[in-house]
Amino acid sequence: MANISFFSSAFLRFAAYLTVALCAWTCGRQLADSKAQGNFYTPRYANGFCIDTGNGTKTLTVLNPFQSSKDVAYRYALSGTPPTRVICMSTTHTAFLRFIGQEECIVGVSGAGHLYDSLLQAACRAGAISDVGYDNTLNVEKILALQPDVIFAYGIAGEFSATAAKLEELGLQIVYIGEYTENHPLGKAEWAVAFAALFGCESLAIEKFAPTVVAYEELKALAATATSKTKTLLNAPWSDAWFVPGALGNVAQLLSDAGGESAITLRSQRDSYPISIEQAYSSAQTADVWLNAGQAKNLSELRAMHKLVQSIPAFRRGSVYNSNARVSPQGGSDFFESGTVNPHIILKDVIKILHPDLLPNDTLTYYRQLKIQ
């Protein structure tokens, strides 16, 4: 069924427990002579994949694609005809495929309502792309009927893990994508090269990624000219907690590159974690700006999240911005779709918010200021 010659499912499961140290022999940035070792592409920003041509076989290695995973590696041998039928378990995957010009290969998505791209939405309505369900409503029979060459999956433990094992037993090929675990926004975008490797068009992805890097680094240099760091409150109350990003994650990196610093002292870790709402509220008193305010579409919705919200100075000043400027009528967010391959545009937005004087003639793309409604 598959057009890409991957290692067998049994080997794939075995490979999941290979140590990262073993894969570092082919993927590590510190190779004394990467060419001599057969290395084909070592990412500049991404930590979660590499492409190797050692022993005469081109291989995509994916490292630790699961949140908080350690010593996990998947190796996919790349040979034969590129895939023509793929299923995307995340809308982020569709953005990567559009970036490398392979969106016409998409025959299935998980949760069509989460799509922002209007052309993909139209394809779903026309029946050219099928919705295979979401989380615990995944339709295995529909997935099988679509006869996919590849299923792109994100590594989050839960309902899909059991389904993935079943799909592999039935002979389907699953490629785990861990872009969301990267600690740099450019590292997330660089996963376009990993996708391209599966279609044999790495040079295209590398060429398209290069100007993204240049634009991002130029904007970062501009932000570095600001006279001070803007204190920023991140995220919003959720149930009885306030989740904040780890200091080693891509959100914290982007904030720093934009000339900001978190009002909440962040732990030295990659993954997000919860703190008490009272602790967040205390730190919020020093924040000049509030970013990424949960699911709130306006200040009224944000205020309804918790009684303490309306007492936060940034809220009272109306200095609250959310990444939902581009949302489909069904709720699909382009921030999580095309934003993944456009980190330079997101960086520009955040610089515009934190240091508007540095970009006086620019307008926001993914972000918008929340208003009372």
Image (cartoon, rainbow, N blue to C red):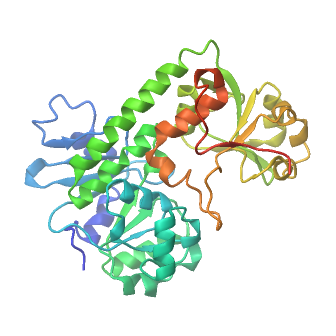
Place of residue 149 in the rendered image (x, y in percent of width and height, measured from the top left): 29, 74
Q: Residue at x 46, y 67 (%)?
A: 119
Side (left or right) of 286 relative to 328:
right
- In the image, 255 versus 299, the foreground residue is 299
Residue 5 falls in image quadrant:
bottom left
Residue 81 in the image: x percent, y percent?
Answer: 17, 69
Residue 78 point in image, percent of width and height: 19, 60
Does the rendering let one see residue 138?
yes
Write the residue at 76% across / 52% down: 296
Outermost residue, front direction?
Answer: 361
Residue drawn at (57%, 79%) of the image: 137
Q: Residue 171, relative to residue 63: is it above or below?
A: below
Placement of 371 over or under 3, stated as above or below: above
The N terminus: image quadrant: bottom left
The image quadrant of residue 262 is top right
Closer to the camera, 225 or 51?
A: 225
Q: Residue 34's quadrant in the figure?
A: top left
Residue 151, position in %: x, y? 37, 70
Residue 68 appears in the picture as rendered: no
194 or 162, nearer to the observer: 194
When the figure is inspected, residue 221 is found, relative to residue 120, above or below; the finding is: above
Q: Decide if residue 306 is on the left or right side of residue 141.
A: right
* Number of marks: 0
User: Between 177 and 146, which is closer to the camera in this rendering?
Assistant: 146
Most extreme residue toward the top is 227
Taking the image as shown, residue 311 lies to the left or right of residue 342, namely right
